[in-house]
């Protein structure tokens, strides 16, 4: 499976060395500010089914589910075991490099929903990953991707680097569409700017999501 209808050069990176080396040392920090984190939590709470088994794709130190959201389980899939072991919202986790193996190590229809927070920009074969994500999700389950303008620039794919926030959203929506997801949405979920003595504003936040088509017959 490949990135159909998307030029392969879009997925080049400045640093093509092994991802395992880059993610070997744990980075126990959050990558977006408090306002953007709150927006992520709110969106997940709106869309994820209560009591479901949730997949945290490209997981790390924090999952950003709200304290009021109650899943049955949260399984993390990421690159650093130390980070995921210190994530209080994960029930279990697996270390897995999606750029090396886009097939997820889970059975068909294992999850009631999936989230991916500020990490989609690192996938070098996103359509293949999204197709297999659809396989492990149940019918009608949501796959929700949130992102800001923050990234590790040497590991983000080339097409991401020069894209506007809206273009990034369009790109993720294209991945979902190519992978066979339905009812695709993209929304600007940036928190309202807060007045500051020092000027400036917080991190922007976009959400893009789609659903596995429902069972037929």
Image (spheres, rainbow, N blue to C red):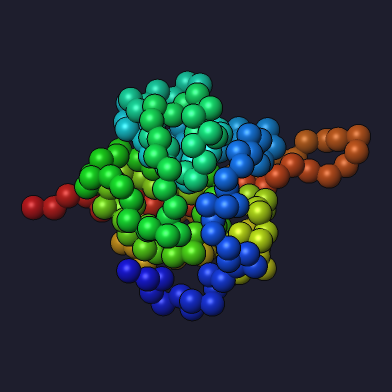
Q: How many numbered marks appear?
A: 0
Name the spot of residue 118 as percent of width and height, x first. Answer: 57, 47
**Relative height, residue 75 to residue 154 (above, below):** above
**Relative height, residue 142 to residue 102 (above, below):** above
Residue situated in front as seen by the camera: 193 or 128: 128
Q: Where is residue 162, by image quadrant?
A: bottom right
Name the spot of residue 88 as percent of width and height, x first. Answer: 50, 24
Query: In the rendered image, is residue 140 in sight?
Result: no
**Quadrant assignment for the N terminus:** bottom left
Name the spot of residue 120 as percent of width and height, x first. Answer: 52, 54
Residue name at image x 62 percent, y 46 percent = 205
Residue name at image x 65 percent, y 41 percent = 31
Q: Where is residue 17, by image quadrant?
A: bottom right
Name the spot of residue 129 as percent of width and height, x first. Answer: 38, 58
Residue name at image x 47 percent, y 21 percent = 68
Residue name at image x 39 percent, y 39 percent = 94
Query: Relative to 203, is 140 on the left or the right?
Result: left
Query: Relative to 200, is 115 on the left or the right?
Result: left
Residue situated in front as seen by the camera: 137 or 140: 137
Residue situated in front as seen by the camera: 174 or 114: 114
Query: In the rendered image, is residue 109 in sight?
Result: yes
Query: Relative to 126, is 169 on the left or the right?
Result: right
């Amino acid at each position: 499976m490949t990135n159909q209808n998307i030029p392969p050069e879009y997925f080049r990176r400045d640093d093509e060395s092994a991802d395992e080396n880059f993610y070997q040392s744990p980075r126990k920090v959050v990558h977006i500010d408090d306002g953007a984190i709150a927006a992520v939590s709110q969106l997940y709470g709106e869309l994820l089914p209560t009591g479901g088994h949730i997949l945290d794709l490209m997981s790390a130190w924090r999952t950003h589910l709200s304290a009021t959201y109650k899943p049955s389980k949260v399984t993390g899939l990421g690159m650093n075991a130390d980070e995921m072991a210190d994530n209080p919202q994960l029930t279990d986790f697996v270390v897995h490099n999606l750029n090396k193996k886009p097939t997820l190590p889970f059975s068909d229809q294992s999850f009631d929903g999936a989230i991916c927070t500020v990490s989609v920009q690192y996938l070098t074969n996103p359509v293949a990953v999204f197709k297999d994500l659809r396989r492990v999700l149940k019918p009608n389950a949501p796959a929700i991707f949130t992102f800001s303008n923050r990234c590790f620039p040497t590991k983000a794919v080339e097409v991401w680097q020069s894209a506007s926030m809206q273009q990034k959203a369009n790109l993720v929506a294209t991945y979902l569409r190519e992978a066979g997801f339905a009812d695709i949405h993209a929304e600007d979920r940036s928190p309202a700017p807060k007045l500051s003595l020092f000027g400036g504003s917080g991190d922007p936040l976009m959400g893009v999501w789609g659903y596995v088509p429902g069972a037929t017959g």
